[in-house]
Amino acid sequence: MAAIYMTEEGYKKLMEELNRLEGIERPAISKQIAEARDKGDLSENAEYDAAKEAQGMLEMRISQLKNTIANARMIDSSKLNTTNVQIMNKVKIRNIATKQEMTYTIVSESEANLKEHKLSVTTPIAKGLLGKKVGDKVEVTVPNGKIEFEIIEIAI
């Protein structure tokens, strides 16, 4: 798997989630399974089936987190620049057709959050912006067609 670039804050959030899942959620599900098992016939025990399914989902999430953390590479914000768009830059863009302006921070996939205007580096818009400079116009293909943006500002 390729390196996953993220901020120290994003890394800490993943570690906190992993610790909570392993330290609190996993023992709680094990207890639910044991209690359901004690109720007898497992072939018709909905509680047991639900607890086993929850355990499977939990273990899958723990595995995903461990994989992401193992491949994480911290980004040193002191080495970022604003010459061209790169991960961790805050980019102000204008939709050329609608004149609407938006500002997004380009982040790793695990840190993406549209409510916070954090755009995953793997999205079509971010891919179109990477490497470009202020004043550049980029055409991005999105699910409902093509959109042309102009880069107005690049900040850290």
Image: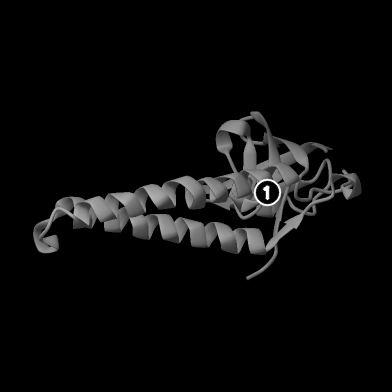
Query: Which colouring convention does the figure follow?
Result: one colour
Q: Residue furthest toward the bottom? A: 1
Report which residue position mark 1 lands on: 11
Specify whether 82 is left or right of 35. Answer: right
Residue 70 in the image, given as x and y percentages of width and height: 65, 63
Q: Quadrant of the C terminus?
A: top right
Residue at (90, 45) in percent of width and height: 78
Front one among 49 and 119: 49
Instruction: Locate the N terminus by quadrant.
Output: bottom right
Q: Check the image and report above or below for 61 versus 104.
A: below
Q: 54 or 133: which is nearer to us?
A: 54
Q: Tag 1's secondary structure?
A: helix
Observer-nearest of 116 and 22:
22
**Which residue is rendered at x = 75% and y = 50% of the image?**
87
- The kind of residue tagged 1 is Tyr
Q: Position of residue 59 (x, y in %)?
A: 43, 60
Residue lying at the far front in this picture: please name it.
38
